[in-house]
Image: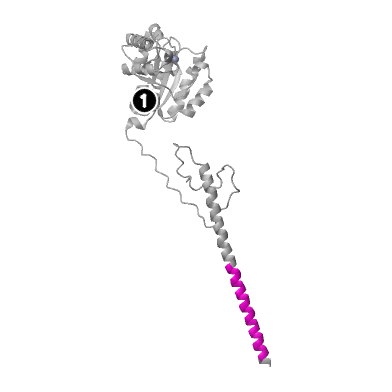
Amino acid sequence: MRGTRTRARFSRSRRTTLRLFAALLIAATIFGLSAIQLSGRMTLGNDAVPEAAAAAIEPPAGIEPAPDVPTSIASPAVPGPEREPAAQPPPDASPKPRPPIPPPPAADSGKEDARKLIALTFDDGPDGKYTPQVLDILKERGAKGTFFLVGPQVSKYPDTAKRILDEGHSIGNHSWSHKDLKTMTPEQIADEVDRTQQEIADATGYTPHLMRAPYGNISPNLLDALRERDMAHVYWTIDTRDWAGTSVADMRKNVSAHAQPGSILLMHSFGGRKNALDNTLALLPQIIDDLSNEGFAFVTVDELIESGQTRKSVIKH
Ligand SMILES: [Zn+2]
């Protein structure tokens, strides 16, 4: 009797254990299925959001995306229009390895190209007041510049024009009348260019092959005229606006912020608002020292073109 009760109790407890085990098994199966379904939903959810966000952060055509930001995998941190609350990535999602950073381009061994070159240009001279002082500053600091001259000033100050060349600088043509060449006929343009070329040649014995149109206003007619004469038009990349009386501090900041190899600075050595060019004289030694300390060398526009450092859009042939 006692043995039977014991067997019965044992068999009851075994059945209970088995039932419990079965229940656990079922529970585990259900939980497992839910987990798979849940993870499936999470995967779908994750795919859906990045696709929309990836479209939102697609860079405009022509702009190279940064190499370390894969646009196909959108980060939840990237704001997109009408975004769902940020979905957490699945716990096993490890960050994609970044592509290796490309090595910096090898420095050119050529001496000329290894230097950071910059061109200082001075328009509207020569004159008897500012141009000689600009020349003094350049001489003192061993910097070279390019002077775009207007014909009537050359006829008034031929010796200053000659001094520019004698001290190793370059001369370009800046028209005769300093009017807008864009509105002129081919005949008028030819007259503006040729009269000034002749005046410069008479004063210095040198015939320029560079031209800067007043206000940088070029036209197809002007470019045709320059091509016929084997000349090139020269823009600038940094406008100091010295003629307007811009403060020395503002001009210095502007130059420091934008100077890079191949830069062409626009300044003046005659004209402008009353006494405005006093600021140019104060600025010049400062920017030469600033940029020299950054390793820049000051060359003529001709040398800059030869070096290949100048931007193609700045020189029009
Ligand atoms: Zn000018």
Q: Is residue 169 visible?
A: no
Where, by quadrant of the figure, is residue 180 drawn? top left
Report whether the residue tagged 1 is closer than 8 Å to ligand 1: no
Left or right? Give the position of 250 relative to 185. right
> Could you tell me which quadrant the C terminus lies in?
top left
| Image location of residue 311, percent across then percent down | 39, 28
Q: Residue furthest bottom?
A: 1
Where, by quadrant of the figure, is residue 227 drawn? top left
| Image location of residue 137, percent across then percent down | 43, 18
Where, by quadrant of the figure, is residue 200 drawn? top left
Residue at x-position 55% and y-position 59%: 39
Q: How is the image coloured?
A: one colour
Please tell me whether mark 1 sits on a helix, a strand or a loop. helix
Number of numbered discs overlaid on the protein picture: 1
Circle 1: is it few (<14), some (14-19), or many (20+) Cα within 10 Å?
Answer: many
Q: Is residue 20 visible?
A: yes
Ligand number 1: quarter of image: top left
Left or right? Give the position of 55 relative to 189. right
> Could you tell me which quadrant the N terminus lies in?
bottom right
| Image location of residue 139, percent across then percent down | 39, 19
Span highlighted in magenta in the image: 4-29
- Is residue 232 magenta-colored? no
Q: Main secondary structure of the magenta part?
A: helix
| Image location of residue 84, percent across then percent down | 60, 47
The residue identified by callout 1 is 304
Indicate the amino acid at tag 1.
Leu
Left or right? Give the position of 196 relative to 278. left
- Is residue 23 magenta-colored? yes
Residue at x-position 62% and y-position 78%: 17
User: Compared to 161, does 120 lie above or below?
Assistant: below
Q: Nearer the viewer, residue 284 or 136?
A: 284
